[in-house]
Image (tube, rainbow, N blue to C red):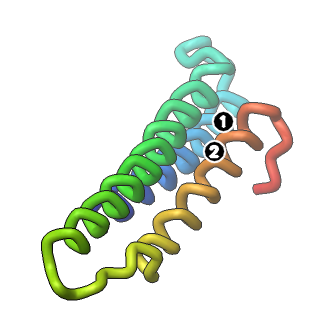
Amino acid sequence: MGWVRTSLSLISFGFTIYKILQGVTAGIKLGLIKPQEPRRLGLVLIGLGTASVFIGAIDYYTTLKRLNKLSDRDYNPFNYTFSVGMLIGLFGLFLFITILTHTEFF
């Protein structure tokens, strides 16, 4: 759950930074921020969050597989935690692709 929480924070912070700085650079032409910089920063944060949620899901899956070998109880690795992690990862991947290809839906 820690992986999911942190990844979701990175993804949402990246998207928020992207949108806020995009609006700021569009409204103010001071030259302090280059027009492509909000997009790059947002992509880095969203990519980092998406990658970390997938890494966390893989770590969760392998941990439960090891627990199955060591205990008498059967732990199902495909439960709500794993499913929520995968959904957040797919959402992050969707946001990353839409920002990368300039086909934003939000």
Q: Please rate how many residues cluster around mark 1, counting C-alpha atoms within 10 Å: few if below 14, some from 14 to 19, many from 20.
A: some
Which residue lies under the disc numbered 2? 19
Question: Is 101 in front, or is 22?
Answer: 101
SS of the residue under disc 2: helix
Q: Please rate how many residues cluster around mark 2, counting C-alpha atoms within 10 Å: few if below 14, some from 14 to 19, many from 20.
A: some
Residue at point 44% right, 81% down? Answer: 79
* Numbered label tally: 2
The image shows residue 3, relative to residue 76, as above or below, that is above
Residue at point 46% right, 76% down? Answer: 78
**Rendered image: mark on residue 34:** none
Residue at point 53% right, 42% down? Answer: 46
Q: Are marks 1 and 2 in contact (CB under 8 Å)?
A: yes
SS of the residue under disc 1: helix
The image shows residue 47, relative to residue 16, as above or below, that is above
What is the quadrant of the C terminus in the image? bottom right
Which residue lies under the disc numbered 1? 22
What is the quadrant of the N terminus in the image? bottom left
The image shows residue 3, relative to residue 26, as above or below, that is below
Please, what is the three-letter code of the amino acid marked with disc 1?
Gln
